[in-house]
Image (cartoon, helix red, strand yellow):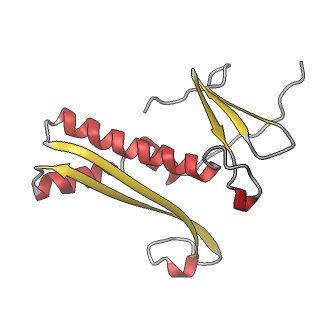
Amino acid sequence: MAAQTDKETPHIVVRGGAENFQQEITAGKHHLVADEPTSAGGGDAGPDPYDYLLTALGVCTSMTIGFYARRNRLPLENTTVSLSHSRIYAADCEECETKEGMLDRIDVEVELTGSLTAEQHAKLMEIAAKCPVHRTLTSEINIRLRAAEKS
């Protein structure tokens, strides 16, 4: 849940060749692989980009709930966060500001186990929506894309 600041050295580096969709990812000291499923012309060597996006949200949600429960000594035993992404017609979304065209929908289901009271459960569900990644995805995002300087 650490915030990424403006540093000279990138924390995430993604490299891939032009011959296929497979990408090698370096995240600090960790090495990951991303790919597209075979149905999309990939080799299915790793999760696709939306899987990683959902993973970030799910992990952050679970970590935030667990942190709050530990800090407040709540009897939470386990958290399971299940996520899915879809594209929907804006007109079909009553709670959305956008009313025309298509928009992205992320469904998040949170299962909490432990001897929680109804009030504790409700509070943890409220906290779930306050994880930093959730806040990022629901706020204005400014992505600055630039060409790398040639060395």
Residue 12 appears in which quarter of the rendering?
Answer: top right
Q: Can you say whether 149 is above or below 143 in the image? A: above
Residue farthest toward the right in the current orientation of the protein: 150
Say which residue appears at 29% left-offset and 47% top-offset: 79
Q: Quadrant of residue 32?
A: top right
At x 57%, y 46%, the residue is: 52
User: Residue at the location (74% across, 42% down)?
Assistant: 22
Q: Position of residue 92 (x, y in %)?
A: 52, 81
Q: Nearer the viewer, residue 44 or 14?
A: 44
* Camera sees residue 131: no
User: In what quadrant of the picture does the N terminus appear?
Assistant: top left
Instruction: Give the number of marks.
Output: 0
Picture coordinates of residue 84 (x, y %)? 49, 61
Question: What residue sits 24% from the left and 39% below the top?
Answer: 68
Q: Position of residue 60 (x, y in %)?
A: 41, 42
Q: Quadrant of the C terminus?
A: top right
Q: Is 93 on the left or on the right of 18, as rendered? A: left
